[in-house]
Image: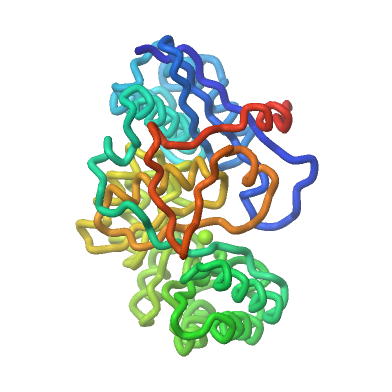
């Protein structure tokens, strides 16, 4: 089988809200083959930059767009393709946007391999640790404790047994920060797990103050309290509190995750497959397993990402939750025609061939943004 084309399609609504909410738009990767099999992936990054990373024509041997590198390759040779993409983009790549674009291509390649073999991706990854995974509802904070509590209560009523809230307005005001956490705990009761996403809001000393304030509310983890390169801060914070410290959504490479675990001493890594890929994502998850560190997905885009994450989480021994985005956006709701269903707080791992998602081509075409 040969890859015949790689398209990067930016799907964007007419209006964008000014919030830290990446579910609003999506960059879809579509790979076609000479056998008629089509694979889909997704990239959660800065869409037009990753689109250019795919489309850019060859410049020289260490600086090429990804489409030119991948066309003509056999998708079953995914390790060779990854290595070739990495080497051919050394100047613009190695971390960040270029690796994100490579990750989207890698997802689409796994979708093709699964479709060709008529097997779900988790079977090809040696999975089967679990066929359903406990879900946490992942949302943005509302702007008051009362509104946040109301939303938390509504998630529990929908059957979720774990909830996460994050980002603004958490950050500058210690009293508001504590009131937000307290309001969630009071709304959901003692039996529901709570995660808090600090959204990179603090320096080390302020984060140490916040973990002390949050400890009485028994939160399962505190996510990204510090900027991603503050490894010294992560280590001091993680060793100062009983609360698990989680991070990783800013990382795109195995090296980055190893640094977070070994120098940052964090307790939970969060891998976004639309920034890392399945091929590298599995290696990262097993690096964590070896260190007895939990590996959870990061997902705040469409169910292409959710499905890919379920396949990986079913294939590793060190995952206990699926992050499931509950923010409503037309793009998130409509790109995938057969969305992942949540029942009684669990998501079933897709059993169809490939990633197991069908794309609404008409919707994608209608909302395609051309720059
Ligand atoms: Mg986060």
Name the residue: 69% across, 26% down. Answer: 365
Q: Position of residue 33 (x, y in %)?
A: 44, 14
Q: The N terminus is located in which quarter?
A: top left
Comparing 315 with 362, the one in front is 362
Answer with left or right where residue 76 lies relative to residue 52: left
- From the viewer's perspective, is residue 339 above or below residue 90? below
Residue shown at the point (56%, 44%) measured from the top left: 302
Q: Position of residue 38 (x, y in %)?
A: 47, 21
Residue 51 quadrant: top right
Q: Nearer the viewer, residue 26 or 290?
A: 26
Q: How is the image coloured?
A: rainbow
- The picture quadrant where one finds residue 152 is bottom right
**Is residue 259 visible in this depiction of the protein?**
yes
Q: Is residue 90 visible?
A: no
| Residue for point 32% across, 32% down | 119
Q: Residue furthest left?
A: 290
């Amino acid at each position: 089988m040969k890859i015949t084309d790689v398209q990067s399609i930016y799907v964007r609504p007419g209006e964008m809200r000014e919030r830290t909410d990446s579910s609003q738009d999506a960059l879809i990767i579509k790979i076609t083959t000479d056998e008629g099999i089509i694979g889909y992936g997704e990239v959660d990054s800065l869409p037009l930059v990753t689109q250019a990373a795919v489309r850019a024509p060859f410049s020289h041997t260490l600086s090429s767009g990804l489409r030119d590198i991948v066309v003509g390759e056999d998708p079953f040779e995914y390790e060779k393709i990854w290595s070739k993409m990495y080497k051919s983009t050394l100047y613009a790549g190695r971390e960040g946007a270029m690796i994100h674009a490579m990750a989207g291509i890698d997802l689409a390649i796994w979708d093709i391999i699964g479709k060709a073999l008529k097997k779900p991706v988790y079977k090809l990854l040696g999975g089967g640790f679990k066929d359903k995974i406990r879900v946490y509802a992942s949302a943005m904070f509302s702007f008051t404790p009362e509104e946040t509590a109301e939303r938390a209560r509504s998630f529990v009523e929908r059957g979720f047994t774990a909830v996460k809230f994050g980002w603004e307005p958490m950050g500058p005001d210690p009293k508001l920060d504590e009131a937000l956490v307290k309001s969630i705990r009071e709304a959901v009761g003692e039996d529901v797990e709570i995660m808090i996403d600090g959204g990179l809001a603090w320096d080390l000393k302020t984060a140490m103050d916040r973990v002390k304030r949050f400890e009485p509310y028994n939160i399962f983890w505190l996510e990204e309290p510090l900027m991603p390169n503050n490894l010294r801060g992560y280590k001091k914070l993680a060793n100062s509190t009983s609360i698990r410290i989680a991070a990783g959504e800013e990382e795109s490479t195995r090296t980055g995750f190893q640094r977070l675990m070994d120098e940052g001493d964090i307790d939970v890594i969060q891998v976004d497959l639309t920034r890392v890929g399945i091929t590298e994502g599995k290696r990262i998850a097993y690096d964590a397993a070896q260190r007895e560190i939990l590996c959870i997905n990061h997902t705040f885009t469409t169910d292409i990402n959710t499905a890919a994450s379920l396949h990986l989480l079913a294939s590793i021994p060190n995952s206990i939750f699926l992050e499931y985005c509950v923010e409503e956006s037309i793009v998130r709701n409509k790109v995938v025609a057969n969305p992942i269903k949540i029942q009684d707080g669990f998501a079933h791992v897709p059993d169809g061939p490939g990633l197991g998602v069908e794309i609404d081509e008409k919707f994608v075409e209608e909302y395609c943004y051309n720059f």
